[in-house]
Image: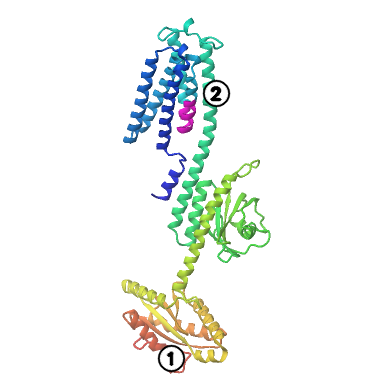
Amino acid sequence: MTRRAAAANGGELVPLTERVRYMLVFRVLAAAGVAATIPLAREHLFAAEDTIAAVTTAYLALALSAHTAWRLVRKPRATLFGLMLIVDGAYLAWAAYATGGAASPVRYLIVLELLAVSLLASYRTGIKLAIWQTLLLVAVYYAQKGGVFVGFDAEHRTNLIGSPWEQAFVFIVVLWVVAVATAAFSAVNERELRRRRSDLEALAALTDRLERESQPAGVAEALLRTVVETFGFTRAVVAGTPDGATFVALAAQDAVHIDAGEARPGAGSVLDHAARTRTTQLVSGLDPAADSWLDRMLPGARNLIVVPLAAEGRAVGALVGEHQVRADLRVERRLLSMVERFADHGALALRNAWLLEKVRDLAANDALTGLANRMTFGDSLARELSRAHRDGGDVTLVMLDLDHFKQLNDTRGHQAGDEVLRRTAATLREQRRAYDVAARYGGEEFALIAPGLAAADATAAAERIRAAIAGNGCGVTASVGVATYPADAADPDALVAAADAALYQSKHAGRNRVTRAAGSLA
């Protein structure tokens, strides 16, 4: 069973099968009540005791048969339930007439039936039952008045005040007061139950969506879409803060500037306050000075709900939604509570997505330099050569090794050596094109995969990188080797070997220079 189906079933506090069972219990108790009334109303019976007993027995048999049929069949269950309500009304109306008419205690069972049906079925069904009982009471009255049933003679006259019609009218009024009052209160409860069921279904839908997302932006989009659909926010933004201080927009609904960059909100910002206190903020409007970043995305926003996204004791973001509410009304506590529950689920998923992203980054990149690691380098080179083979393009591989790096570590220390490696990586990032892959190949050796860079242009590109490293202020130089597919090699291993051989030629030739692989185009 899916979470959504489970939530839907969970929305019914009492399952339908159990409600039908309760109705069967009521019918058995009603029949027992009619049987108990016979000795109490023996002086005012309008039917023979044997007749009442026979009708009651037949009613019980029909009720048990209907309950058995309800358990066996599937499609006509609603019809069967409705028919039994008609039978219930007819039986109780006749039993009330047979056991004394207006003076019969069975009429209290009619009121109890009305209450039971309204609570177990629905208030609409209760109103329909009240109409049915009213018709039956009027029909019995006119049947007595017309002589079809035992009439209002001196022998069967009751001690109640008023004429038989007045007695029937008073009971009908009481019946309708009970029906309307029960329907009103039942409607309120039913509406609240439906709303809570809808909220649970939406929460289950959010959980399903979050399970399918593994990227922070996807998690934020799933949270935003579900919250907007469920609570009717006109505009909304999900902002993430991986470090707890800098916010970035991950998803937005009708935001003007979703690409507003990053922001470090300070004192007075609703984002900063929500993140620090981890409490929901209700804001009538944004302060353009304190929340300029948020104001650019939601200009002129009013009636904002700012819900912090917190997981494991720290803020990971915030959900900001613009809610339509009248100026003289407050936001419902139920709405705030449900939005906070949605935010809790979204915050945990967002935290997990960032952790997963970090794990992926550690698996794919070098921890010190942030460049692609050896494994990622191998996968990228194989992929680019496969694409070049398919499209008939070129791929240039630039291999470089820092000169005298061991000596630098020995004289200046390993921390200085690490800083040189980081600065070299930064230089490679600056010099590469957007679709090039820069990697730390191992130790002080780096590599650059340049798709589409032909052999004729490779030396100039490598010379530019060498000069940038020599001039980045670290006091080190690099020896560079260049090889190009397919001019110098036909597969990834051969291309690495060719570029590596060219690099060592640069080393042997005096370092701080670029050498192309043997056999390269002039």
On residue 506, which mark appears? 1
Write down the residue under mark 2: 177
Q: Which residue is rendered at x = 43% and y = 91% of the image? A: 506
Q: Residues within 10 Å of mark 1 (few under 14, many from 20)?
A: many
Give the residues in magenta: 112-126
Q: Residue flagged by tag 2: what amino acid is it? A: Val
125 shown above or below 340: above
Q: How many marks?
A: 2
Q: Which numbered disc, 2 or 1, marks the residue that appears first in the sequence?
A: 2
> Mostly what secondary structure, the magenta segment?
helix
Q: Tell me the element at label 2.
A: helix
Q: Which residue is rendered at x = 51% and y = 41% of the image? A: 195
Q: Distance of mark 2 from mark 1, alpha carbons?
A: 101 Å
Q: Residue flagged by tag 1: what amino acid is it? A: Ser
Q: Residues within 10 Å of mark 2 (few under 14, many from 20)?
A: few
Q: Is residue 373 left or right of residue 281?
A: left
Q: Which residue is rendered at x = 34% and y = 25% of the image? A: 61
Q: Position of residue 334 (x, y in %)?
A: 57, 45
Q: Tell me the element at label 1.
A: helix
- The reply to whether dot 2 and dot 1 touch (C-beta < 8 Å) is no
Q: Answer yes or no: is residue 521 visible.
A: no
Q: Position of residue 129 (x, y in %)?
A: 45, 24
